[in-house]
Amino acid sequence: MAYYKIVLLIILTLLLNIDSKAVDSLKVYKLGEINIVLDKMNFFSINPRINYGEIQSKDVFLFEDLKTLLPSFNLQTNSRGESIFTYRGSQERQTNFFADGALLSIPWDARADLGIFNPNIIGRIELLPVSVLYGPNNMMGIVSMTTFERKYNGFGGTAKVQLGDGNAKNLSFTHDGRINNFNYILAANFLDVAGKVASKNTPEDLQNYDYNSALITNSYFKQKNFYGKTEYKIGEVFAIGTSINYSMYDKGVIPEEHKKPSKARFWKYDDNDRFLFTLNSNWFLDNNKMKFTYWLDKTHQNIDSYEDITYSKRKERESNGDLTNGFRLINLYNFSDNNHIALAANAVLTTHDEDIISFVNDEAGEKEGKTENTQFSQNLFSLSSEYTHKFGDKLETKIGAEFDYVITPKAGKFIEANNTKNSDFGAIFTANYLLNQRNTLFGNFSRKIRFPSLRESYSAALGKFKVNPDLAPETNILAEIGYLFSNERLFCKATLFANFYDDMIVKTYDSESGLEMRANIASAKIFGSEFILQYDITKHLNINANFTYMYSEGTDDKVNIEHLDYRPVVAGALTTNVLTEIGVKSSVELDFIGKQYALAGENQFDELDPTCLLNLRLSYDIFVSNFIVEAYARCNNIFSTYRRIKIGIPAPGREFLCGIIIKI
């Protein structure tokens, strides 16, 4: 605890000496946005946006605490202990997350573990529809997260201290400033959670579960995160910015409670780190706008596998090193006020180095045994174009096409798969019709491709999976139509959507080995509807709501598949915020997820019961000179409802949190 006190003292000293005479106004960090537009086009905006104030009101320890803000997103903590979001019944690798323009997914696994991302630096989250400008593997769309920048000259900062059940402690601060054309952000976050609180209604017949503890087995998490960003603008012509995001973390993996001990994962992540460098630049030349993004992602990850729930004897360690270089170049040319074309090139080059280290345990203790090294590499390329045309002030259409290409120079032990190549195309068509200034009709049609990741094709996951090197790419045709109403106080969006998959990659069981494996199924369909509401009823009362209904089915070898796993029939969230004149604020949150199914054994599905969680937050703002001091208390899952995030993986029970936030 000593370093917490020291850092807090430094923060408070810094904040007390800040010159705050300038107006403190924050806006989104433009360089980090991946969406590219020309202001004179006056685009129709139909994308839901989650702004800084909404994000901070969630008192986030981890990114997963933002779940109720993300419409149609379902949180999953998978069997590897990763916090994954899925969208509209998609799979965890079918939606891409970007931060400051950089891809957060590690290409080796094509998943973004958002649990290790510091949410305190986010200024805006925007949900973008399917596009061809950002490469393959984003079949369901894109989530763009950007940090904030100061609009006027001046300096400011935020310090936050949070405590909670499970011996949770979080200390974070941000400091930002602007000097004419130069602005910057510095941030640090220190998080230590002994474990997630178990539900009081946990069943009494679970396997791999420690009933003598009030915490969910092996659910601890420790993290240190440091972030820095600079940006410099030359008039209205050129801007360049860099950011560095560095995380160090350790965490436990909740063992699957439905499996026999011999099949469960008794894993711990020990001594891990991730370094992400991003460079963004914009050029504006008459009717031309160019956006360039480069990122370097270096990750080191250790997974220790233990014999049983005591975590006393290690069997193996998987030591992973990933190095990824990526870039995106988009050039947008404006022919006139009514039409423009965008040309884009994307590339992601990655290497993965894996050591499997065995351990021998005897009376003398633990000894390191054999080490087996495997190397992988993969390169993804994409060329694309989108043409946008406006017909008067009412109708806007967009048509686009992309060509995606992947080559795998190294496939680990599968030498015969070295230099395997694959390619395919994608296409989109969208139309937005403005009925009047407040009402819009819209429709989208797209075909997108997702190539299987290296891990899906060639990794045995420490003996828990049977490898299937013959996985084929999966394709998705998405069709949606909808209606949008928007004014100064109300954003309301209703959408009908349909997804048609070919060669969808699903998890199944191999009867011969008794292990899980991944395989392609012939086809799958997901139909649904989505409703989003953001309404400022008065200046003291607002509500945010989202609701999704889905129906899914699959076919393989002309036989209907009984269920597609983790496609809830209904899901939704409702948040009501009340602000009084004396600075007291309250929030009530409902988080509902309906019936869904999960693969529990060979051709056996387990039904996950519907659940509704109730959260409550109370806070009080105190204005002291140039400071705003906010004290808050929060209770999540008030009734300690037992929810399974995935089969065998429980969500936290009732948790109490409190904190103090100092803003200037």
Image: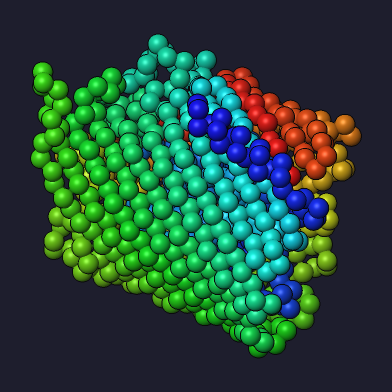
Q: Quadrant of residue 283?
A: bottom right
Query: Residue 489 at what x, y percent from top left?
Result: 83, 51
Which residue is depicted at the point 45% across and 60% down? 277
Asked if 309 appears above or below 542 in the picture, the reply is above
Which residue is depicted at the point 35% across and 42% down? 272
Which residue is depicted at the point 13% across and 46% down? 372
- Left or right, 189 with reference to 534: left
Name the colouring of the figure.
rainbow
Query: Residue 622 at what x, y percent from top left?
Result: 80, 33
26 or 351, which is in the foreground? 26
79 or 299, which is in the foreground? 299
Query: Residue 261 at what x, y percent from top left?
Result: 26, 24
Image quadrant in which the C terminus is located: top right
Give the residue at the far top of this rendering: 212
Which residue is depicted at the point 77% across and 81% down? 392
Asked if 634 appears above or below 402 in the picture, the reply is above
Q: Number of marks in the image? A: 0
Whether residue 182 is visible: yes
Q: Quadrant of residue 161?
A: top right
Asked if 559 appears above or below 214 in the picture, the reply is below
- Left or right, 587 with reference to 208: right
Whether residue 503 is visible: no
Q: Quadrant of residue 661?
A: top right
Query: Residue 475 at what x, y percent from top left?
Result: 40, 62
- Left or right, 592 with reference to 352: right
